């Protein structure tokens, strides 16, 4: 396994990896790898011959009061996990390598007005900027992302379409702990007591899904009740709502054959948790 920190070195090594006609998969990460990331790597082998993992804590997607400085960085541990999974190459640049002379940015018109985009201004612009750069540097045949960050996936999908990236995009289902909590590098911030309460967000989503599947097609009161229930358990709600899967706009009334996502984001102590469940009628 090669570990590259510069763009020219990475491109040179990728030429070698492609020399035998191999399909290349990219798994973009910010490191602090957990079983959710490893599932992306394993799934990548169903779509490609060789896997590249990027590890880069992207400064331009963090707001001024967010956790860029404290975000977990576990380089040696991450490298060991990648090596165990048979990864061919890790691309692990620093910020000066990725943004040596940054003058341009990406603007989003619609898809970030709700969900995480509403409360994290500039976040998705930063995500799209770095993913666009990674696509251009690695030029993968396929790239894999987790469903937990579903708004991110839909935005990347739209970016790839509009910027004409000839890349297959794969969304891998949420990987969960035994108690249902969606795996996240930020779960490490949770105290023992907070960790016990954190799966309640997922259980709330499951309850909403059950009620909708049972015939509720105008879930306004149902959603309001679940927000109150979570707040009573110590959560500070960012959002908990039903969104159209394609437009990411809130859905007040479900219609036939509509694809939607029940999605929530909430603070438990100092940790922001996100989760979602896909539904279709």
Image (cartoon, rainbow, N blue to C red):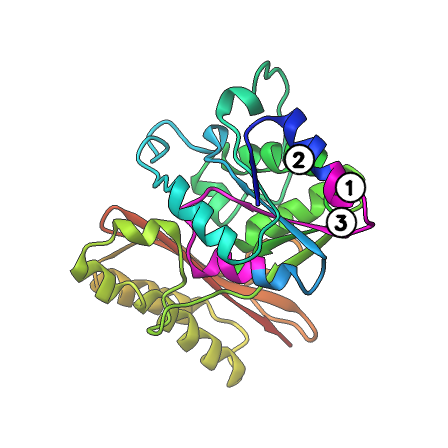
For label 1, count other residues whose C-alpha is less than 10 Å away and answer few (under 14), some (14-19) or many (20+).
some
Which sits in the foreground, 207 or 192? Answer: 192
* Extreme residue toward the bottom, this view: 214
Q: Residue at x 59, y 26 (%)?
A: 6
User: Considering depth in this image, is 16 or 193 the residue closer to the camera?
Assistant: 16
Name the side, left or right, on which 259 lies relative to 238: right
**45 on left or right of 269:** right
Q: Which residue is mark 1?
A: 165
Q: Nearer the viewer, residue 49 or 239?
A: 49
Q: CA distance from mark 2 to mark 1?
A: 9 Å
Q: Earlier in the sequence, mark 3 or mark 1?
A: 3
**Chain part drawn in magenta:** 15-41
Q: In the image, is 229 to the left or to the right of 254?
A: left
SS at mark 3 in the image: loop
Q: Are marks 2 and 1 in contact (CB under 8 Å)?
A: yes
Residue 11 in the image, given as x and y percentages of width and height:
70, 32
**88 sits left or right of 203 in the view:** right
């Amino acid at each position: 396994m090669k570990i590259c920190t510069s763009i020219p070195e990475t491109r040179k090594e990728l030429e070698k990896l492609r020399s035998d006609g191999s399909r290349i998969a990219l798994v973009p990460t910010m490191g602090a790898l957990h079983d959710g990331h490893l599932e992306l790597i394993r799934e990548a082998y169903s779509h490609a011959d060789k896997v590249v993992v990027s590890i880069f804590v992207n400064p331009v997607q963090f707001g001024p009061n967010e956790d860029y400085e404290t975000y977990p960085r576990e380089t040696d541990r991450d490298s060991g996990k990648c090596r165990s999974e048979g990864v061919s190459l890790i691309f692990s640049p620093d910020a000066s390598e990725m943004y040596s002379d940054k003058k341009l940015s990406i603007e989003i018109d619609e898809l970030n007005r709700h969900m995480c985009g509403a409360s994290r201004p500039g976040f998705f612009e930063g995500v799209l900027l770095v993913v666009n750069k990674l696509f251009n540097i690695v030029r993968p045949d396929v790239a894999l992302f987790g469903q937990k960050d579903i708004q991110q996936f839909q935005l990347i999908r739209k970016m790839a379409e509009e910027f004409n990236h000839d890349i297959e995009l794969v969304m891998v289902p949420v990987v969960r702990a035994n108690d249902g909590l969606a795996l996240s590098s930020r779960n490490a911030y949770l105290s023992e007591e907070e960790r016990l309460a954190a799966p309640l967000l997922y259980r709330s989503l499951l309850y909403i899904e059950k009620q909708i599947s049972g015939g509720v097609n105008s879930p306004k009161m149902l959603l309001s009740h679940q927000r109150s229930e979570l707040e009573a358990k110590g959560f500070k709600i960012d959002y908990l709502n039903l969104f159209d899967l394609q437009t990411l706009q809130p859905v007040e009334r479900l219609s036939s054959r509509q694809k939607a996502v029940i999605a929530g984001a909430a603070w438990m102590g100092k940790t922001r948790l996100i989760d979602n469940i896909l539904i279709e009628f």
